[in-house]
Image: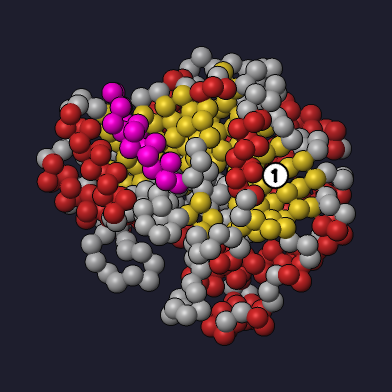
Amino acid sequence: MFINRRNRAKQHLAQLNYVPQQADNIEFISGPKAFKQAIIDLIRTAKTRIYFTALYWQLDEAGEEILAEIYQAKAKNPHLDVKIFVDWHRAQRNLIGAEKGKTNADWYAEQRALHQNDPMFFGVPINNREVFGVLHIKGFVFDDIILYSGASINNVYLYQQDKYRYDRYQKIKNAPLADSLVQFMQTYLTAPDAVFPLDDKQRPTTKEIKHHIKSFRRHLMTQGAYQVKGAEPLADELCITPLFGLGARDNLLNRTIQDLFVLVEEKLTICTPYFNFPRTLQIKIRDLLNDGKQVEIIVGDKTANDFYIPPSEPFKMAGGLPYLYEKNLRSFCKKFEHEMNNGHLTVRLWKDQDHSYHLKGIWVDHQYMLLTGNNLNPRAWRLDAENGLFISDPKQQLQPKIQQELSEIRQYTHIVKHYSELDTLEQYPAPVQRLLKRFSRIKADKLIKMIL
């Protein structure tokens, strides 16, 4: 049975559309400050197009600086094609817990009026409510170069001030791949009845377009796919393919992730900021451990979670999430205590002072790697629009760069030796205890795990 699963997984990967990739044209950028500088440098040198997809572009110092660079580039080169796709809902609300005020979309509209420019910011509504799906597609394109990261544009992702949120950052030069990402945005993220310029003050309300949003989501879920010109079958050379996924059925990205888990021969390494695997991945991890394979999971400490609220600050409901994820992790470590003891399972917690952790990704043996914004949780699996870049490296040409990246990721981690190292409910702050007990009592914790 397992052999049949492996054969099906290999056949599926072989059927994907790949483009050749030169190893020298993939750069693993080290750290958020270098990532920010790469964005600025590429904006300044772009000649024909700049395309962004991100969850949000924040009104703060970093957001203002990068947008100023965009407008300067546009002023110098009026024919430069600039399109920025962000989540429709996220752009039109304030930060969780913040007082109501100017939204990101309000700021976009002000800047457009100031510069008298064509629309640049487009709001993509993946569902009628943000909690049931957001635009989580990643990738910035500058001419024929792609910057791929899970990061959005704001102070903490770009280490503008005293805190950073750690992510992965890859710079890839590949014209057909860049064309594919841009074509996807132009084809699927510009539906005239559902996607509107956020920098237009006359944009409609969500209520006014709710029926169009439903149709848009359905079309994106059933038809959305990357087209790659000059694509080739899987070969014995370094190659790469873009993947898109939305919804629980016929999701190419989800299917490929599952196949990668099946194809592990020696070791699987996973990064995720929110420890909340969908059931299908839980089962596959169990199967790998039962088969004697090595599994390494690198997850953020609860204090490195972007929802974490120090006990000294006023508590808000979202602040309970890091504790819920730690509860999941403790249960997982207890369940696989034997595998942790014999070295088959390694769980690493990342913590660097009061910085936060946002890494996602999959490494299989020394051959496969997935760049993705997918959090490998039920929300990503069912609700959000996700993408990824799958890399096959049979000759291990990228291994020096990959091992350097993993070494940097592990630098601020420690290995969990036993589940008892993780806090219990009784050790949490009183507001967290009350919240989690209430969730458990009304059986809301399962629902929360599905949508957050």
- The amino acid beneath tag 1 is Thr
Residue at label 1? 269
Region of the chain picked out in magenta, as a range = 32-52
Along the horizontal axis of the image, is 52 left or right of 220?
left
185 to 158, vertically: above or below: above
Q: Residue at x 56, y 67 (%)?
A: 303
User: Which class describes the residues within 10 Å of circle 1: few (<14), some (14-19), or many (20+)?
Assistant: many
The answer to whether residue 26 of the structure is visible from this angle is: yes
What colouring style does the render use?
Answer: secondary structure
**In the rendered image, the vertical position of residue 119 relative to residue 415, given as above or below:** above
Q: Is residue 125 visible?
A: no
Q: Residue at x 26, y 44 (%)?
A: 67
Q: Quadrant of residue 325?
A: bottom right
Percent position of residue 118, x then y: 18, 37
Q: Nearest the camera: 89 or 392?
A: 392
User: Where is residue 6 drawn, in percent x and y?
Assistant: 79, 33
Tell whether 266 sits left or right of 46.
Answer: right
Residue 87 x, y percent position in the rendering: 37, 50
Q: Quadrant of residue 361?
A: top right
Figure disc tally: 1
Does residue 36 show up magenta in the picture? Answer: yes
> Residue at position x 51%, y 59% from top?
356
Figure check: 114 above or below 329 = above
Residue 409 drawn at (x, y percent)? 60, 47
Image position of 182 (left or right of 259): left
| Label 1 secondary element | strand
Q: Quadrant of the N terminus?
A: top right
Query: At 77% from the left edge and 37% from the top edge, which residue is drawn?
Result: 264
Q: Main secondary structure of the magenta part?
A: helix
Q: Is residue 383 above or below residue 20?
A: below
